[in-house]
């Protein structure tokens, strides 16, 4: 490529970076990159790198207009990344390069990695009641409790196995010794190779909780004070959002995973834990007037998924009254008899 063409590529890259490139100019830039050798392209882009690296994000409205103007679809940027030129063709093919500044460039000398923002996330949401079954691309099985969501990238499993959970989920992680599996909750990251565990991470609750059924799990908090804990089977870790406290204790896993089963089994559980379990399974909120009641211990089994029949048993056992506050059994008020 001659000096004139070098300058033309640099000029078009400048317009591309600033969001002023036209559809015709964009196609011209793509064409010039197609006929440029990897080494030539590297030399040009190395000189342009600092400009890209310090570019300020465009407003969403302008991004949308540019996206429409250039008639680019997300699938255009999902190509095999074989050569340096292909990396930059992906960038040129994606208006999202302009968006965020989080799209970094892999160069031979700087060893930076492209993170393609144009690859949209997959978001799976469960319903208001019951549970949903999700099978991830790597074969991992996830059971989502009511009012929960699971988010992962479309390239999940290619280089990493990361998911984000809001709500509650039980994970049966497919073992892969080369790629760790990480569940992100916003407060703590749960990392495994292959195992079974339950995560409770509703955004409107004061705690995030992980209970391990089998295998080994590493937990790392993402907010100070930073803590790292290795968890063994029949142990659980609870993170308290308000204080940042991390509590590591033994558990039977019965109450933590009861929402998955038709049969509810409680062994020496506090009534507070029983209510928590029922809340997870049935989407019910409990308003308990006498807080001391929550410390009472309960052992028993329910094989009926009717919340009304369960409450009748607990009422007889603890001699309390309960009242349906909203008419649909989603909010129950517990008061002394």
Image (spheres, rainbow, N blue to C red):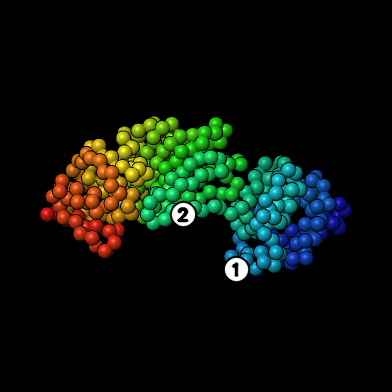
Task: Estimate the x, y position of residue 56 in percent, counting from the top left.
Answer: 61, 60
- Residue drawn at the location 26% of the way across and 48% of the way down: 275
Q: Nearer the viewer, residue 38 or 52?
A: 38
Quick check: marks 2 and 1 in contact, CB under 8 Å? no
Label 2, residues with CA under 10 Å away: few <14, some 14-19, many ≥20: some
Compared across the picture, whether 138 is left or right of 44 comes to left
Extreme left residue here?
Answer: 337
Task: Estimate the x, y position of residue 186 in percent, counting from the top left.
Answer: 44, 49
Figure quadrant of residue 101 = bottom right
- Residue drawn at the location 31% of the way across and 38% of the way down: 254
> Which residue has dot 2 on it?
125
- Residue drawn at the location 53% of the way across and 40% of the way down: 139
Q: Secondary structure at mark 2?
A: strand
Task: Estimate the x, y position of residue 156 in percent, counting from the top left.
Answer: 57, 45
Q: Secondary structure at mark 1?
A: helix
Figure quadrant of residue 94 = bottom right
Q: Nearer the viewer, residue 223 or 174?
A: 174
Q: Nearer the viewer, residue 114 or 274?
A: 274
Of labels 2 and 1, the one closer to you: 2
Q: Is residue 70 above or below residue 38?
A: below
Specify the quadrant that holds the C terminus.
bottom left
Compared across the picture, whether 327 is left or right of 62 comes to left
Determine which of the numbered discs, if any, sits on residue 13 in the image.
none
Spatial separation of the CA atoms under disc 2 and disc 1 = 28 Å
Count every numbered label the image shows and give the total. Answer: 2
Please report whichever mark, 2 or 1, sits nearer to the chain's N-terminal start. 1
Task: Estimate the x, y position of residue 257 in percent, counting from the top left.
Answer: 35, 41
> Which residue has dot 1 on it?
61
Question: In this view of the protein, can residue 273 be seen by the observer?
Answer: no
């Amino acid at each position: 490529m001659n000096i004139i063409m070098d300058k033309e590529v640099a000029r078009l890259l400048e317009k591309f970076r600033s969001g002023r490139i036209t559809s015709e100019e964009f196609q011209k830039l793509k064409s010039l990159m197609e006929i440029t050798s990897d080494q030539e392209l590297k030399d040009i882009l190395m000189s342009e790198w600092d400009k890209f690296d310090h570019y300020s994000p465009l407003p969403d409205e302008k991004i949308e207009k540019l996206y429409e103007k250039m008639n680019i679809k997300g699938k255009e940027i999902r190509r095999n990344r074989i050569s340096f030129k292909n990396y930059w063709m992906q960038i040129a093919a994606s208006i999202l390069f302009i968006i965020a500044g989080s799209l970094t460039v892999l160069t031979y000398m700087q060893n930076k990695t492209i993170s393609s923002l144009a690859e949209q996330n997959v978001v799976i949401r469960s319903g208001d009641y019951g549970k949903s079954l999700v099978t991830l691309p790597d074969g991992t099985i996830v059971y989502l409790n009511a009012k929960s969501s699971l988010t992962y990238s479309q390239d999940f499993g290619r280089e990493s196995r990361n998911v984000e959970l809001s709500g509650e989920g039980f994970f049966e992680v497919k073992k892969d010794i080369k790629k760790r599996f990480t569940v992100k909750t916003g407060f703590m990251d749960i990392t495994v190779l292959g195992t079974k565990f339950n995560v409770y991470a509703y955004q409107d609750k004061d705690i995030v909780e992980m209970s391990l059924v089998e295998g080994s799990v590493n937990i790392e908090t993402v907010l100070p004070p930073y803590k790292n804990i290795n968890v063994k089977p029949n142990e659980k870790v609870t993170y308290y959002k308000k204080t940042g406290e991390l509590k590591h204790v033994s558990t039977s896993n019965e109450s933590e995973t009861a929402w998955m089963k038709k049969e509810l089994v409680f062994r020496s559980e506090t009534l507070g834990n029983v209510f928590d379990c029922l809340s997870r399974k049935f989407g019910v909120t409990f308003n308990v007037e006498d807080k001391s009641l929550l410390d009472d211990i309960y052992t028993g089994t329910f094989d009926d998924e009717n919340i009304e029949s369960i409450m009748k048993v607990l009422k007889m056992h603890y001699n309390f009254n309960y009242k349906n506050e909203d008419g649909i059994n989603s909010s129950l008020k517990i008061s002394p008899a």
